[in-house]
Amino acid sequence: MVFSGIWGNGMKANKVYNNNAVAAVVPDGREAILVGSGIGFGKRPGDVIDQKKIQKIYYIQDELQSRFLQLLKDARPEALQAAEDILHHARSQGLELKNQLILSLTDHICFALERAEQGTRLPYLMLSETKMMYPKEFEIGRWALERIAALCGTELPQYEAGYIALQLASAEMNGEEVYDSLKLVNGVIEIIKEVYDIELNPDDVDTIRLTTHLKFLAQRILRRSQWNDDDMDGLYQMLLFRHAKNRDCIARITAYIRNHFSYELNHQEKVYLMIHLSKILN
C-alpha cells in the first residue's frame, strides 16, 4: 500500500511512538496514526515520513486516542493485525461492530498469547452456554484462533473462542446485558440438569431451541418487557403435572430469577418454558 502518489511528498511526523508508529497531520487536516514496519525508526518530530512504509492509517477519536497509543506501545504488530482481520471477518458475517472493538480485541489477544507462552490456563467456564447462545459469534471465535495462529505463530486453547465470542456479542449489545443473560441462562440450565438428573447435548436441536428461548427470555427480563399473561392457567396446570418434577423445577427457576434478577415469571412465560422442557424430557 503506497500513499506517496496520493498525498505527495514531505509529510512530517508530529510524534514518534516507536519504530512502527508515528503521528502526522494528513493532507485533509486530520491527525492520524500511521503504522508500518520501521516507519518510526530513527525518526524525530519534524522528520519527513517515508510514505512507502505506511501500511495502516488510523483516525482515532480524541477520547480513545490515549488508549490506542498506549496499545501501540505495548502490543505486538501481528496481534493488532489479527484483531483487524477478526473485526473485518465478523462484519462480513453480518455483525454490526464499531471500530473501537479493535482496542479490546488487540488487548485480549496480547494477554492470551502471553498466558499461552507462560503456560497459564484460564478456562472459560460458560463455554457451552456461549456456544449455544451465540453460535455465529462462536464460529467467528474459532476462525479467529486460526487467524491468530497464522499471524502470531501460537495456537491458543479452544476455549479462547468463547472469550472472543463474548467480546463480539458484548460489542453488539450492552456488555452488562450479555453477562447477565449468560448468568440467567446458565443458572436455569443448571437447575434443569439437577432437578431432572440429565445432561444436555449442546448440539441437540431441542437443547438449542431451549437455549434460544432462554436467551430471549433473559433479554425480556433484563429489559423488563414482560409478556401478557393471556388466560394460560388451564395449560399451565396441565403442563405443571405432566412430569413429576416439573413443579419443583419451575418453582426453583422462578425463585432463582426472582432472587437474582428481581423479576416474577408469569404463567405464559412458565408455559413456554415447560413446552421446551417437555421436548427434552420425552
Image (tube, grey):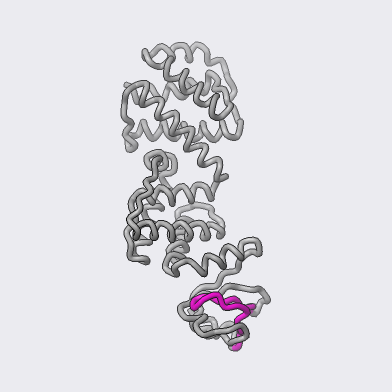
Against 174, residue 81 (above or below) is below
Against 66, residue 177 (above or below) is above
Q: Nearer the viewer, residue 141 or 124?
A: 124
Q: Quadrant of residue 46?
A: bottom right
Prevailing secondary structure of the magenta residues: strand
Q: With 62 as the anchor, is 127 left or right in this view? A: left
Q: With 132 as the anchor, is 221 left or right in this view? A: right
Q: Nearer the viewer, residue 10 or 179?
A: 179
Residue for point 64% across, 64% down: 61
Residue 206: image location, x then y, percent: 36, 31
Indicate the quadrant containing the C terminus: top left, top right, bottom left or bottom right: top left
Residue for point 31% across, 34% down: 201
Residue 25: image location, x then y, percent: 64, 78
Residue for point 48% across, 20% down: 271
Q: Which residues are magenta?
A: 10-26
Residue for point 31% across, 29% down: 199
Residue 16: image location, x then y, percent: 57, 78
Residue 161: image location, x then y, percent: 39, 50
